[in-house]
Amino acid sequence: MRWRTEIKFGVLTAAGLAAWTLLAWKLGWHDLDFTNAQHGKKIAGGVFALGLWLAVRERRARQDGWVNFGEGFQTGVIVCAIAAFLNGAFLALYSRVLNPGWLQRAWEWQKAGLIAAGAKESELGRPEAIANASQRIEFQMLLDPIGKVMVGMILATAIAALLRRKRPEETEAEARPVD
């Protein structure tokens, strides 16, 4: 099957992101005090990048140790698209069934911190609109995953550039002078 690596690592990356979210919830980071939860995005980003890295490495291994930039980039983008949309579906489930209201509590915690830092209530309109939009199903199922795919494309570019290995015949063809 042509897309076996991409599907496998897309699902594994989404499962890793879901596991991290559930762990943060069980640790109490999604309840009232979100101090630790704000750092969770860094770990989630690491899980995402690791999934892309491992997928491109596996594709290279399946191709006898060779992968060009385009193949690595394609693998990375497909993995991030699968992971992003599966994670969006999980977050919609998490926000509505497992831990309803956690996004609103997170916004209230952030808002209290902004006000304590000197922000005026009138300055919080845009952040509040963003917080309210992030709770909508279409944001979680479509807009947020599209944003993750865009970030994933940047990661896929970097990872494909780092892991590429040209076949010897490709290198020789580039070295030959053009008549």
Image (cartoon, helix red, strand yellow):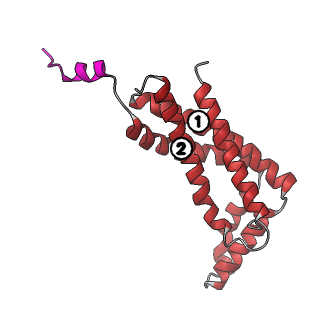
Q: Is residue 57 left or right of residue 171?
A: right
Residue under label 2? 152
Give SS at disc 2: helix
Residue 176 lies in the magenta-colored region:
yes
The image quarter containing residue 10 is: top right
Give SS at disc 1: helix
Q: Mark 1 or mark 2, which is nearer to you?
A: 1
- Asked if labels 2 and 1 touch by Cβ distance under 8 angstroms, the answer is yes
The residue furthest top is 179
Residue 105 visible, this angle: yes
Q: As shown in the figure, which amino acid type bears the numbered disc 1?
A: Val
Magenta region: 168-179
Residue under label 1? 79
Residue at 66% across / 39% down in the picture?
Answer: 12
Q: Earlier in the sequence, mark 1 or mark 2?
A: 1
Where residue 51 appears, x then y in whole percent? 57, 42
Where residue 122 appears, x then y in whole percent? 67, 77
**Real-space Cα separation, disc 1 to disc 2, in angstroms:** 9 Å
Residue placed most toward the observer, 92 or 143 = 92
